Image: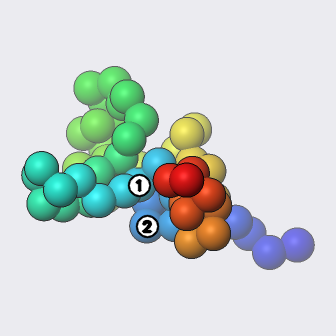
Amino acid sequence: MAKQTNRCETCLYYSYDDEYDCYCCEMSLDEDEFFRFLHGSFDNCPYFRAGDEYSIVRKQC
């Protein structure tokens, strides 16, 4: 069984924010989670959900 990666770039909740001109997590992270997210050490995120282009397009419709 292949290990599932949980990099933010592949997460359904990681999306581009036009107002801030950057990618952001759409989940409400607490202070500690947000600190780990900003420093790139947010392994095993409890909110991670694998996303793909097709599910994102379906979400926008």
Above/below status of 26 relative to 49? above
Farthest residue toward the front?
61
Taking 32 as reference, is 48 left or right? right
Q: Residue 34 at what x, y percent from top left? A: 29, 37
Mark 1, other Cα within 10 Å: few <14 / some 14–19 / many ≥20: some
Q: Residue 45 at what x, y percent from top left? A: 52, 45
Q: Which residue is mark 1?
A: 14
Q: Residue 41 at what x, y percent from top left? A: 36, 54
Q: Which of the labelled discs sits on residue 61, or is there none?
A: none
Numbered marks: total: 2
Residue 56 or residue 24, whichever sits in front: 56
User: Mark 1 falls on what kind of element?
Assistant: strand
Residue at x 27% of width, y 26% of height: 31
Residue kind at label 1, given as amino acid type: Tyr
Residue 38 or residue 51, whichever sits in front: 51
Q: Residue 27 at what x, y percent from top left? A: 42, 35
Question: Which image quadrant for residue 15?
Answer: bottom left
Question: Which image quadrant for residue 16?
Answer: bottom left
Q: Earlier in the sequence, mark 2 or mark 1?
A: 2
Residue kind at label 2, given as amino acid type: Glu
Q: Which residue is mark 2?
A: 9
